[in-house]
Image (cartoon, rainbow, N blue to C red):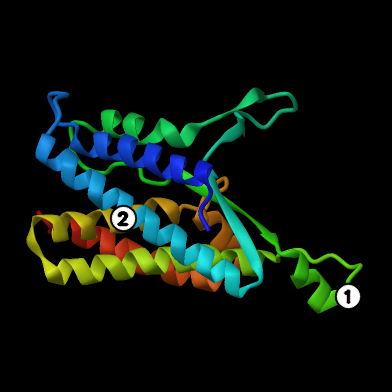
């Protein structure tokens, strides 16, 4: 069940990402693209989150969606922000501006998740007074279900076609690509450390799909 804060994050990132997608080379907004992007990004984020929440449920756990934040900016002790920096809210715009001459990719990995085992999971598996931690493999599987769902959506809507279908397929592939990067709290990092073979398989499929997007209008 999505919480109010989670819904707020989805709406915020939908607006920011759609704005970045619709930004043209002369820094104007393509209104038609903005409207299509708002719908497409909201749907792909919602599907990704619902699939991961469902996977977590079957693993007797629950996840909480949050904005991607970073606390450290270096490797030395003390090199960290006093307050976590919400990098997920800025990356789509920053990335689009940096690549304006190419008018290509838009960063789409802005939301991450925390996972915790439900109390009855610990009781059922280890006794009422024991505790259970989710393993990296479990967390990786939850993250992978979201990526797989987005790649599946991309395939379906590519064959559906039309302006929205092609755009939606492309955005799902971009979403999978950026979220597969194994850094920080992104899904790719969870999959990489949870199951390297699974990460490699999904990474290859995603890279092939990204290459194919250059042939899409």
Q: What residue sits 33% from the left and 61% below the top? A: 207
Q: Residue furthest bottom?
A: 125
| Percent coordinates x, y for residue 159 in the rendering | 14, 71
Helix, strand or loop at mark 1:
loop
Residues 43 and 97: in front is 43
C-alpha distance separating marks 2 and 1:
40 Å
Q: Are marks 2 and 1 in contact (CB under 8 Å)?
A: no
> At which x and y percent is residue 34?
18, 39
Residue 132 in the image, given as x and y percentages of width and height: 80, 66
Q: Residue at x 12, y 24 (%)?
A: 26
Q: Indicate the secondary structure of the residue bearing disc 2.
A: helix
Q: Quadrant of residue 215?
A: bottom left
The foreground one among 153 and 97 is 153
* In the foreground, 204 or 29: 29
Q: Earlier in the sequence, mark 2 or mark 1?
A: 2
Q: Is residue 198 above or below residue 72?
A: below
Marking on residue 104 = none
Residue 141 visible at all: no
Residue drawn at the location 52% of the way across and 63% of the way down = 53
* For residue 71, side relative to residue 110 (left or right): right
Q: Quadrant of residue 35?
A: top left
- For residue 123, what is the image quadrant? bottom right
Residue annotated with mark 2: 43
**Is 172 displayed left or right of 100 in the figure?**
right
Task: Give the number of marks.
Answer: 2
Q: In this rendering, is residue 39 above or below 209?
A: above
**Crowd around label 2: few <14 · some 14–19 · many ≥20 (10 Å):** some
Could you say where residue 133 lies in the image, as x and y percent from the top left?
Answer: 76, 63
Q: Which residue extends farthest right?
A: 129
Task: Write down the residue under mark 1.
Answer: 127
* 47 relative to 117 in the view: left or right: left
């Amino acid at each position: 069940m999505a919480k109010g804060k989670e819904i707020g994050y989805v709406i915020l990132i939908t607006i920011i990402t759609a704005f970045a997608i619709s930004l043209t080379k002369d820094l104007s907004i393509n209104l038609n693209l903005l409207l299509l992007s708002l719908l497409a990004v909201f749907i792909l984020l919602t599907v990704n989150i619902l699939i991961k929440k469902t996977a977590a449920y079957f693993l007797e756990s629950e996840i909480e969606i949050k904005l991607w934040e970073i606390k450290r900016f270096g490797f030395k002790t003390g090199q960290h922000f006093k307050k976590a920096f919400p990098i997920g809210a800025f990356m789509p715009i920053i990335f689009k501006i940096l690549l304006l001459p190419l008018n290509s990719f838009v960063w789409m990995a802005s939301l991450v998740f925390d996972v915790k085992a439900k109390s009855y999971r610990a009781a059922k598996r280890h006794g009422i007074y024991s505790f259970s931690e989710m393993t990296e493999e479990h967390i990786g599987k939850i993250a992978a279900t979201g990526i797989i769902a987005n790649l599946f959506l991309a395939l379906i809507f590519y064959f559906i076609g039309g302006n929205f279908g092609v755009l939606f397929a492309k955005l799902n592939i971009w979403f999978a690509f950026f979220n597969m990067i194994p850094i920080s709290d992104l899904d790719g990092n969870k999959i990489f450390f949870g199951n390297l073979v699974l990460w490699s398989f999904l990474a290859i499929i995603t890279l092939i799909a990204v290459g194919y997007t250059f042939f899409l209008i």
